[in-house]
Image (cartoon, rainbow, N blue to C red):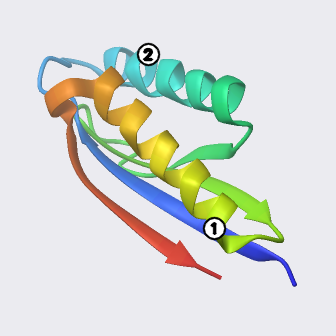
Amino acid sequence: MAVIGVLTLDIFVETSHSLKEKRHVVKSLKDRLRERFNVAVAEIDGLDSWQHAVVAAVTVSNDKVFAEKVLSAVEAHAESVLAGALTGTSIEWL
């Protein structure tokens, strides 16, 4: 049976003064997470906000323990990359 884990990252880019600046930060994060952890990543909310974004990272596995490790590593990496810009996270299992 497949397990689907969705990690949601709430991001507040305080230094952003335009959508272009925010999108640069979000795109950089998405590219890093895809490359390093082989997860699907998309910006799912805050698309028209200059400073707020919600990004989801998704993994699919037949082992929930493995999926939990992947999402925990993604969260830790995002926190290190974003520093104080990461304002919240949540994990949902499908």
Q: Nearer the viewer, residue 82 or 62?
A: 62
Q: Quadrant of the C terminus?
A: bottom right
Residue 24, given in percent of the width and then of the height, sits at 44, 16
Residue at image point 18% right, 17% down: 17
State the SS at label 2.
helix
Side of 61 relative to 44 (left or right): right
Q: Which residue is mark 1?
A: 65
- Which residue occupies the extreme front position in the image? 65
Residue at image point 44% right, 28% down: 26
Q: CA distance from mark 2 to mark 1?
A: 33 Å
The earlier-in-sequence mark between 2 and 1 is: 2
Task: State which mark lies toward you, 2 or 1.
Answer: 1
Residue at image point 74% right, 76% down: 3
Q: Amino acid at mark 1?
A: Val
Residue 76 is drawn in which quadrant?
top left
Residue at image point 67% right, 72% down: 64
Side of 62 relative to 71 (left or right): right
The answer to whether 52 is drawn above or below residue 90 in the figure is: above
Residue 25, given in percent of the width and then of the height, sits at 39, 20
Residue 36, given in percent of the width and then of the height, sits at 65, 25
Side of 74 relative to 81 (left or right): right
Residue 33 is drawn in which quadrant?
top right
For mark 1, does the 10 Å Cα neighbourhood hold few (<14), some (14 to 19), or many (20 or more) residues? few
Q: Which residue is mark 2?
A: 24
Q: Amino acid at mark 2?
A: His
Residue 84, given in percent of the width and then of the height, sits at 14, 31
